[in-house]
Image: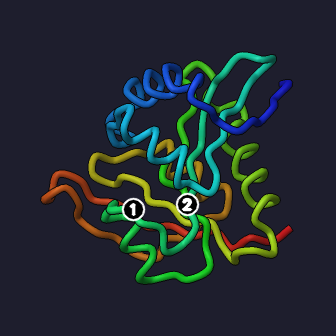
Amino acid sequence: MNYKIKTVDKSDFDFLLSLNQKSLPEVSSINLVGMSYFLKNSSYFKIILDNSHPVGFCIGLMPEKDYSSENYIWINKKCNSFIYVDRIVIDEKYRNRGIGSYFYTHLAQTYYGQVESITCEVNILPYNKPSINFHKKYGFKEIGQKDTENGKKRVSYMIYKIVL
């Protein structure tokens, strides 16, 4: 386990797009325009490497960004001191090795003293049991639920209070 976190740049886009699309429906689809938006506007856009091999990424946004995601808008209305995780995606071959926890710990350390919490949403329709179990184990608590995408999905909004 020799992980390194680095900031994403355009040269990472092929990997990010491929990994994201392999992870549907656990995460929403994204294209090059979406990745470029996050590169320009996200507060935290990192890739994790295992011995120089990319194995996952995480995107986080601070409050009041110009982002039209209905989940981000919901969080903005309910919370005021947060970093919102739009997506955290780990290559299937590398799951259950502590990489998600490593990412969240890095995120918490990065924003400790700047925001009070990390927020996210997890699909409960379709049911994403591994993600729900992971977030609960890490210490996230549910703060609400909502039907999204015209009823195709239902999400659980979750929050983790940053304490180090």
User: Label 1 neighbourhood size at 10 Å, few (<14), some (14-19), many (20+)?
Assistant: some
Q: Is residue 133 above or below residue 108?
A: above
Q: Quickly name the residue at label 2.
A: 61
Q: From the viewer's perspective, tell me whether residue 21 is left or right of residue 160.
A: left
> Of 113 and 1, which appears nearest the observer?
113
Mark 2 / mark 1, whichever is N-terminal:
2
Q: Quadrant of the N terminus?
A: top right
Is residue 80 shown above or below 112?
below
Q: Is residue 164 left or right of residue 144?
A: right
Q: Residue at x 81, y 17 (%)?
A: 51
Q: In the image, what residue type sits under mark 2?
A: Leu
Among the 4 quarters of the image, the one containing residue 128:
top left
Give yes or no for contact between labels 2 and 1 (Cβ–Cβ under 8 Å): yes
The quarter holding residue 95 reads: top right
Amino acid at circle 1: Tyr
- Residue 76 position in % (x across, y down): 45, 77
Relative placement, left or right, of 14 versus 60 is left
Q: Position of residue 151 (x, y in %)?
A: 15, 58
Name the residue located 34 percent from the left edge and 54 percent from the top edge: 124
Q: Gap in Å between the C-alphas at discs 2 and 1? A: 9 Å
The kind of secondary structure element at disc 2 is strand
User: Residue at the location (61% across, 45% down)?
Assistant: 45
The number of callouts visible is 2
As drawn, 15 above or below 24:
above
In the rendered structure, find residue 67 and report the number of the disc placed on it: 1
Please provide percent x and percent y for residue 37.
44, 47
> Residue 67: which quarter of the image?
bottom left
Q: Nearer the viewer, residue 146 or 76?
A: 76
Relative to residue 130, is residue 96 drawn left or right? right
**In this view of the protein, which residue sits in the foreground, 61 or 145?**
61
Quadrant (top left/top right/bottom left/bottom right) for the C terminus: bottom right
